[in-house]
């Protein structure tokens, strides 16, 4: 799981990760209180480098507020989280 680019960002950012083998992948954005903001990926993916764009919206399509967010990648038994900052 790579650090998002750019960081801080406004209004979009890219999150990249590399899968060493085919896996079910879940990539979720959370706010600082741990509430799920948006699920970006929830599917089976093949080996290789992947890039996902987040446009700073929640599940309902509303723009989120400036602040700190976390993104969490789960791929089979692997789990990792990183921090990002949205500045308006």
Image (cartoon, rainbow, N blue to C red):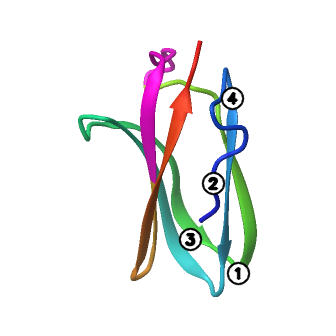
Q: Identify residue for label 4.
A: 12
Point out the frontmost of discs 3 and 2: 2
- The reply to whether dot 3 and dot 2 touch (C-beta < 8 Å) is no
Q: CA distance from mark 3 to mark 4?
A: 24 Å
Residue at coordinates 46% horizontally, 19% vertically from top-left? Answer: 64
Q: CA distance from mark 2 to mark 4?
A: 14 Å
Residue 41: x and y, percent? Answer: 54, 53
Viewer-nearest residue: 74 or 61: 74
Relative to 63, is 34 on the left or the right?
left
For numbered disc 2, what is the local secondary structure? loop
Viewer-nearest residue: 45 or 14: 14
Q: Identify residue for label 2.
A: 3
- The reply to whether dot 1 and dot 3 touch (C-beta < 8 Å) is no
Q: Identify residue for label 1.
A: 47
Residue 28: x and y, percent? Answer: 44, 49
Which one is earlier in the sequence, the residue at label 2 or at label 1?
2
Which numbered dot is residue 44?
3
Give the image quarter of residue 48: bottom right
For numbered disc 1, what is the local secondary structure? loop
Relative to 87, is 58 on the left or the right?
left
For numbered disc 4, what is the local secondary structure? loop
Question: Callout 4 environment at 10 Å: few (<14), some (14 to 19), or many (20+)?
Answer: some
Residue at coordinates 31% horizontally, 35% vertically from top-left? Answer: 32
Range drawn in magenta: 60-71
Point out the frontmost of discs 1 and 3: 1
Which one is earlier in the sequence, the residue at label 3 or at label 4?
4
């Amino acid at each position: 799981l790579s650090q998002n680019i750019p960081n801080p960002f406004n209004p979009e950012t890219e999150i990249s990760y590399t899968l060493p083998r085919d896996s079910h992948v879940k990539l979720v954005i959370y706010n600082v209180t741990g509430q799920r903001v948006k699920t970006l990926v929830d599917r089976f993916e093949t080996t290789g480098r992947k890039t996902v764009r987040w446009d700073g919206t929640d599940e309902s399509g509303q723009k989120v507020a400036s602040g700190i967010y976390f993104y969490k990648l789960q791929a089979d038994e692997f789990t990792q989280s990183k921090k990002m900052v949205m500045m308006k």
